[in-house]
Image (cartoon, helix red, strand yellow):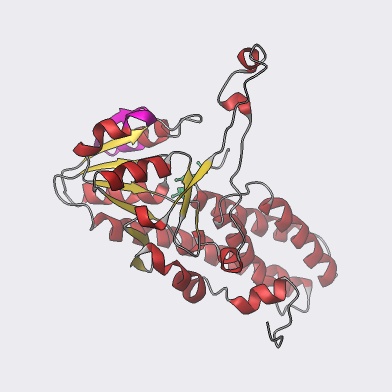
Amino acid sequence: MEVRGAGRIARAAAEALRDHAASVRSSDVAAFRQEMERAAATLVATRPTAVSLPNAVHIVMAGLEHASTTEEAREGLIHRAARFIQSSQHAVEKISGFGARHIRDGDTILTHCNSEVALGCIIEAHRSGKEIEVFATEVRPRNQGLITIRTLNDAGIKTNFIVDSAVRSYIHDVDLVIVGADAVTVNGAVVNKIGTSQVAHTAAEARVSVLVAAETYKFAPQTIMGDLIRIEEREANEVLADEIARTLPNVTVRNPAFDVTPAEYIDLIVTEQGAIPPQMAYIIIREYLGWGIEEFHESIGIGANHDE
Ligand code: RI2
């Protein structure tokens, strides 16, 4: 939890692989590759939900392909890492610009949690001279809303800070909901901070549009093959102090960090390739992420020429 936000997690993983590749002292390319694979697996295991993490690792590790010497492998990986970090930052800028166009002068926007790209859209709209107001939720239990309101405050944006359960009380004052994403599945469902689906459901009932800001590397290729996104369940003491929990033996604290918002509650997903309806998620996975069925067949041991 020291690195927060799915995009920052992806860039941090690319940086870690880059730095590790620079420091591994092995002249044998097979040993170098093995060590990088071990490091990649360690990184991927740190957070199970944000798909940006395995996607970033996959993209960077492709730098090892076709290398016949350690130096070639090292350079290939470092090059891919630098390219990924740069393109990720570029994607955030592009999405901010695209998303800002969906915000009209005088709009009130509601956001949940702390998303770099969602805030990028809001700040860009403000910078372009639109008069806007924001409702930001608290985001129990880790209070990421505090980071959000600090950022909005520093940008000079008029902000209302509300507890998560107050969303329905204010939804009729809101013109647009903008949130980020930790993962987008092939059927256009969005996995994001716990509470997002309640916010989206409330917005749908009030006919308020929901816009999701997500870089293409947050789309989950493995969902093409039917894999589900694992929802990280975090420690109980984030919700209830141990000394209180100890006095309540019949109570179990449940603390899922993310939830799933179905495509029907989402109007648009804004990516760096432009805005798409959530139902077009497959196209992003296939065309822009470059992961196809063939690669999955290989990864699960079905040969390229196999009939299945
Ligand atoms: P950006 C965060 O997860 C939030 O769920 C946020 O909406 C999402 O990642 C996307 O954030 P966490 O890392 O990549 O706080 O848009 O658990 O910054």
Q: Which residues are magenta?
A: 151-166
Residue 186: x and y, percent?
Answer: 50, 65
Residue 196 to residue 104: above or below? above
Left or right: 214 as drawn, with respect to 121: right
Q: Nearer the viewer, residue 136 or 34?
A: 136
Residue 231 lies, in percent from the top left, at 58, 46
Q: Is residue 178 magenta?
A: no
Residue drawn at x 47%, y 73% as measured from the top left: 288
Question: Does 153 lie within the magenta span?
Answer: yes
**Residue 127 seen in the current view:** yes
| Residue at left offset 62%, top offset 47% | 47
Residue at x-position 63% and y-position 25%: 252
- Camera-nearest residue between 196 and 118: 196
Query: Is residue 90 left or right of 301 when viewed as pictured?
Result: left
Residue 27 shows up from this direction: no
Give the tally of numbered discs: 0
Q: Position of residue 250 (x, y in %)?
A: 65, 19
